[in-house]
Image (cartoon, rainbow, N blue to C red):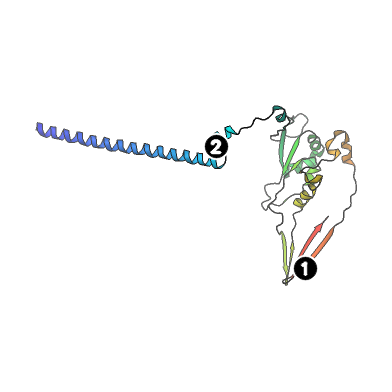
Amino acid sequence: MDQLAAAQAARAEKEKQAVEAVTSSSESSDNEAEALLKGGVSTLKNKWKKMRGSDDATAEKHKTKMSFRLTSLLVYTVGVKCHGLHPDIEYAPEHIFSLSENAANRFVKASMTDLVKHTHTHLVRVYPKGTRVNSTNFEPNRYWASGCQVVAINWQTFGKSIASCPCSRAFFNVVLDLGYMINQAMFQRNGRAGFVLKPEALRHPEKAELLSKRTQHFFDITVSISYFSPGVTLTLDYYS
C-alpha cells in the first residue's frame, strides 16, 4: 500500500510539473508575441514619421527659432459661441463667432445695425445652412453688406449642370451657381489678392449714416449663344 501511494504521489508530482511547464511556455510565448507586436508597431511609426519628414531627431535638428518682434505681429483669432449682440455682452478683440445662414438672416432682419457695429471691431463668419444637401449656395453679398468679413460658400457645385431640358433633338443646358459667381467676381478685385476692403460706411462708425442712403447702379449683361452639331447643343453664358 505504501508503495502504491508513493507511486501515485510521484505520478501526481510529474503531472503538476508538466502542467506548470506548459503554462510557463505559453506565458513566455505570449510575452514574446506581445514584445514583437510592440516592436513592429514602433518600427512602423518611426518609418511613417520619416516618410512624413517628422522624425523627432530631424525636427529637433531643423527647428528654427522665430524673432519675438516678428511673432508679435501675428494676429490670432479664437472661435467662440455667439451670445448675441446686446451692448452688455462683451467679446475680446480676437474673438470670432460663426453664424449659420439662418442665424445670420435673423440678425440681418432684426438688428442689422448692431451686426454692422459689431463688425467694426470683430470678425464674423457666415456659413451655408445644413439643409443645403445639394451643396447649393446663398448670395454672399447679402452678408458682406451686413459687415461680415468671412462668408463661406460651397465650391462643389460650380460648373455642374443644375437645369436641363431635352426637347426634340436639341439639348438645352444652363450652368448656374450665382453665389459662387458673385464670390468669384468679388475677389477678382484688388489684384486678386484674396481680400477686398469694405466700404467706408461698414468700416467707420462715424460714417454709418451712409448706410441709410440709397443709390442707383446700372450694369450691362452680355448673352452669348453657341450652337454645336451634330445633336445641336445650346449653351447660354451670361456676363455682367
Between 44 and 187, the one lying in front of the other is 44
Mark number for residue 39?
none
Q: Residue at x 58, y 34 (%)?
A: 59
Q: Name the quarter where the C terminus is drawn.
A: bottom right
Q: State left or right for residue 12 relative to residue 153.
A: left
The percent position of residue 45, horizontal first and vertical second, equals: 50, 40
Q: Name the quarter where the N terminus is drawn.
A: top left
The amino acid at mark 1 is Tyr
Give the residue number, with chain letter if any, for mark 2: 55
Q: Residue at x 55, y 37 (%)?
A: 55
Q: Is residue 145 above or below residue 206?
A: below
Mark number for residue 227?
1
The percent position of residue 149, horizontal first and vertical second, equals: 77, 40
Q: Is residue 233 above or below residue 175?
A: below
- Which element type, helix, strand or loop, lies under badge 2? loop
Crowding at mark 1 (Cα within 10 Å: few <14, some 14-19, many 20+): few
